[in-house]
Image (tube, rainbow, N blue to C red):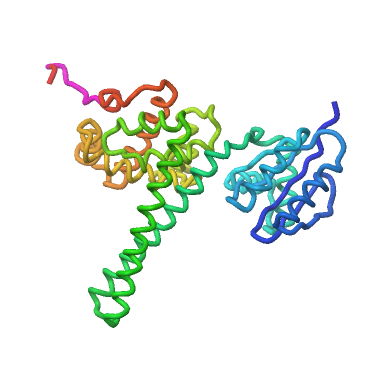
């Protein structure tokens, strides 16, 4: 069987740079509907099976990846940007340009790096788009609230501008509430998603909106991920920094979905408040083990994601005793 033609595509907001493994030339296409169609048509001219690698850099590449996946003989590999960067550094690539990145991705396609990509359902993609838009507006509201607090404290702005910031916050409140209501309604239209929402809402501190935001991100990830792989997808996996006698503190990788990470952080804050077992787990970390508050909340978020993975896999409601059970001493206390 002939080896697939290996093609790498570097995606930017305006252009696609396309390289084929073993060829020095790089083709450039416009990042538009017309450009995507022309690119797919050009790739299809290659005879036999085709392996295409491109970075998962958000909406700019997603439409192209979906279009490529529809072609039967094209094998799409949707590469995490961190993995692409690591692969290029191992190949001693010293420069970073669109053309260089396209050739690096072509080598990844040739080496069959990563698993073949399966696009999520249209419902899952729409849920994620809604949830991410809401998260963007929440961040905008937070910035406006910070501006209001700082200007009120310093008194450097006229009253008219303070009123404008307050009106902006009120407008964002209204838009966020409306989008959240419609997102929950839309999510409930899918019976499987609705059942999974009910499972997640069995965790006291996770309401419908948070449940939908979590499921919106998980629904666009491979269904067969293990709990540890899911933690890595959320960027909550710890990274060591050790060399010789030097062993620096570990930090989370932050290489996954920042949206899932932010939602899990809020879920951790709420569940620590409302679930005694999770509250005790947090207390042990902060009081008995002298962990910083932020480190403890990250640990809660990571453990919550493990728990959610198990709940969805077994289709069971939350059992707080399985989240954390305090260790008893020999006297039984």
- Residue 222 lies in what quarter of the image? top right
| Residue 258 vertical position relative to residue 119 in the rendered view, above or below | below
Percent position (x, y) of residue 256? 50, 44
Q: Quadrant of the N terminus?
A: top right
Q: Is residue 61 visible?
A: yes
Percent position (x, y) of residue 82? 57, 46
In this rendered view, identify the residue nearer to me: 57 or 111: 57
| Residue 13 vertical position relative to residue 307 in the rendered view, above or below | below
Percent position (x, y) of residue 113? 67, 36
Q: Is residue 151 magenta?
A: no
- Residue visible at 38% across and 45% down in the picture: 263
- Residue visible at 26% across and 69% down in the picture: 149
From the image, give the main secondary structure of the stretch colored magenta. Answer: loop
- Residue 250 lies in what quarter of the image? top left
Q: Which residues are magenta?
A: 325-331
In this rendered view, identify the residue nearer to me: 30 or 264: 30
- Residue visible at 54% across and 42% down in the picture: 125
- Residue visible at 70% across and 38% down in the picture: 69
| Residue 165 vertical position relative to residue 89 in the rendered view, above or below | below
Q: Is residue 247 visible?
A: no
Q: Is residue 328 magenta?
A: yes
Q: Quadrant of the C terminus?
A: top left
């Amino acid at each position: 069987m002939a080896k697939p033609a290996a093609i790498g595509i570097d995606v930017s907001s305006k252009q696609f740079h396309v390289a084929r493994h073993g060829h020095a030339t790089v083709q450039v296409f416009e990042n538009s509907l017309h450009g995507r169609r022309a690119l797919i048509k050009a790739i299809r001219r290659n005879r036999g099976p085709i392996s295409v690698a491109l970075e998962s850099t958000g909406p700019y590449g997603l439409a192209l990846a979906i279009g490529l996946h529809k072609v039967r003989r094209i094998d799409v590999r949707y590469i995490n940007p961190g993995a692409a960067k690591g692969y290029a550094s191992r190949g001693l690539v010293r420069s970073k340009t669109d053309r260089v990145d396209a050739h690096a991705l072509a080598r990844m396609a040739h080496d069959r790096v990563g698993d073949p990509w399966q696009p999520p359902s249209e419902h899952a993609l729409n849920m994620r788009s809604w949830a991410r838009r809401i998260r963007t507006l929440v961040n905008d509201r937070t910035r406006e609230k910070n501006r209001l607090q700082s200007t009120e404290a310093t008194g450097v702005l006229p009253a008219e501008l303070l009123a404008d910031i307050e009106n902006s916050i009120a407008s964002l409140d209204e838009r966020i509430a409306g989008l959240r209501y419609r997102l929950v309604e839309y999510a409930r239209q899918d019976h499987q998603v609705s059942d999974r929402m009910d499972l997640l809402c069995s965790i006291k501190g996770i309401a419908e909106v948070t449940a939908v935001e979590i499921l919106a991100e998980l629904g666009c990830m491979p269904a067969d991920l293990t709990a540890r792989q899911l933690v890595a997808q959320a960027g909550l996996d710890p990274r060591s920094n050790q060399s010789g006698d030097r062993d620096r503190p570990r930090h989370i990788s932050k290489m996954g979905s920042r949206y899932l990470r932010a939602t899990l952080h809020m879920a951790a804050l709420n569940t620590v408040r409302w679930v005694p077992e999770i509250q005790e787990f947090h207390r042990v970390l902060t009081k008995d083990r002298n962990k910083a508050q932020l480190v403890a909340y990250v640990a809660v978020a990571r453990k919550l994601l493990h728990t959610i993975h198990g709940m969805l896999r077994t289709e069971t409601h939350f059992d707080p005793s399985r989240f954390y059970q305090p260790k008893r001493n020999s006297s039984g206390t």
